[in-house]
Image (cartoon, rainbow, N blue to C red):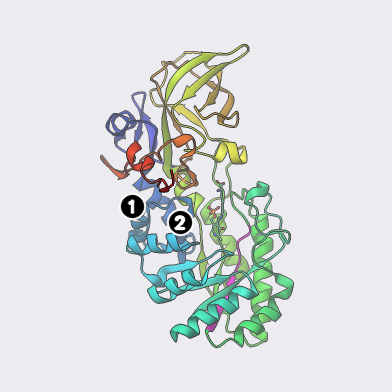
Amino acid sequence: MDHFLYRNGTLFAEDVPVTEIAAAVGTPFYVYSTATLQRHFRLFDEALEGTDHLVCYAMKAASNQAILKTLAQAGAGMDVVSMGEYLRAKAAGVPGDKIVFSGVGKTSDEIRTALEGGIRQFNVESEPELEAINAVALSLGKVAPITVRVNPDVDAKTHAKIATGKSENKFGIPISRASAVYAHAANLPGLEVIGIDVHIGSQLTELEPFRLAYEKVADLTQHLRSEGHNIRRLDLGGGLGIPYVRSNDAPPLPVEYGQLIKDTLGHLGCEIEIEPGRLIAGNAGLMVSKVIYVKSGEDRDFLIIDGAMNDLIRPAMYEAHHDIVPVTEAEAGVESQPYDIVGPVCESGDTFAKQRNMAPLVAGDLIAFRSAGAYGAVMASEYNSRPLIPEVLVNGDQFAVIRRRPTFDEMINRDTIPEWL
Ligand code: LLP
């Protein structure tokens, strides 16, 4: 459920007409709903009620500080994967003891910054990383809390580019080597081993892969405890999918996911962390764009819009489907027609949808891409020298620009010309 609904034929973001935002900021832009962000966070939080837990929002999904602050005020921690994300979370006011640091390639600089600024734990992905964190911690006279990310070799049954829990993926250590790696970690004086971490992939639409992974984590917890490790925190990653196509065939709900966690791991008495990103932000955001031309091809009509693959890359990168709706609904009874919906970038891959049925549109009409809140703005680039598009946050009947559109000069003047030219 989200808060982007039609009223009298006009699409609203909460209590604000999308047309009003478009008039204020121009197109294309991203718009997020505070109520939807809060609601999705709460669904996870409530799903784990009765269990000691922290929902650490995977901020890679949408990292604007206004979004982070909205979620932090609701009680969220953050899952970060880079120096930039760590500093952004801190800038948004998230305390270090609510930030977990994931990622396969943490540099010594990143580790130092996090240890100095405060960190809940590092989710360690390899033995060399254990050594690196140990060395930095010792140099600072600190002890770093860590979990080790295990790779459970489970098929997440999702798009190959976002599956992470198979043995051929670069993530985590093979679960079969866990004993040896934990023994190694326990011998490093700069580290305190506190738990286990697992994340098997993104946009999972079934619970079964989670069950398989979490059962392995349960067994491993007992095994490591029998070897003397004080395993007291389990970080279960993110990955629960969202309904990109509105149909009856929706992915499992957070409450069902929470029940699965309790069923598979509840008996261990561990503190539980989860790292959802997409489910919190995905359906909390739209990308709004304007039709520039309607072009008749030989056998099809193209809607050429002012948004492009550099603004929302998911269709080009993962063949992802986004529902696309008119901002002003057609009169009842108007017949739809198929369009190829494309951006202005000079690549055939700059195609958002092929033969999508829409009520007839004309130049100047606004359309909205649903489910664009996660992995939308954060994956944007300036390809074709197109400035990053603005982000807007709605809260009830108010809205605010939370990242403005840069001017062309700002974009161009970042280049510097060497003196020999
Ligand atoms: N934790 C870790 C360690 C992760 O790698 C990820 C996502 C998450 C949590 C959050 O997963 P979520 O709940 O959002 O599924 N750009 C792709 C998705 C990449 C996901 C990467 N890791 C897309 O647009 O579909």
Quarter residue 261 falls in = bottom right
C-alpha gap between disc 1 and disc 2: 12 Å
Depth check: give the residue in front, 257 or 304: 304
Picture layout, residue 169 above or below residue 127: above
Answer with mark 1 or mark 2, whichever residue precedes in sequence: 2
Task: From the top left corner, tell me how far across and down residue 62 is, in percent.
Answer: 44, 50
What amino acid is at disc 1? Ala
Q: Which residue is mark 2?
A: 59
| Residue 28 painted magenta | no
Depth check: give the residue in front, 244 or 287: 287
Picture layout, residue 398 above or below residue 226: above
Characterize the magenta stretch by its predominant secondary structure. strand
| Residue 194 painted magenta | yes
Q: Quadrant of ligand 1?
A: bottom right
Q: Residue at x 40, y 62 (%)?
A: 76
Disc ID at residue 66: 1
Q: Identify the secondary structure beneath mark 2.
A: helix
Count residues near mark 1 (Cα–Cα under 10 Å), then give few for <14, some for 14-19, many for 20+.
Answer: some
Viewed as shown, does residue 103 lie left or right of 42? right
Contact between marks 1 and 2 (CB within 8 A): the answer is no
Depth check: give the residue in front, 147 or 138: 138
Viewed as shown, does residue 159 lie left or right of 192? right
Quarter residue 208 falls in = bottom right
What amino acid is at disc 2? Met
Task: From the top left corner, tell me how far across and down residue 64 is, in percent.
Answer: 38, 51
Depth check: give the residue in front, 332 or 17: 17
Residue 232 visible here: no
Q: Which residues are magenta?
A: 191-200
Disc ID at residue 195: none
Q: Residue at x 48, y 54 (%)?
A: 60
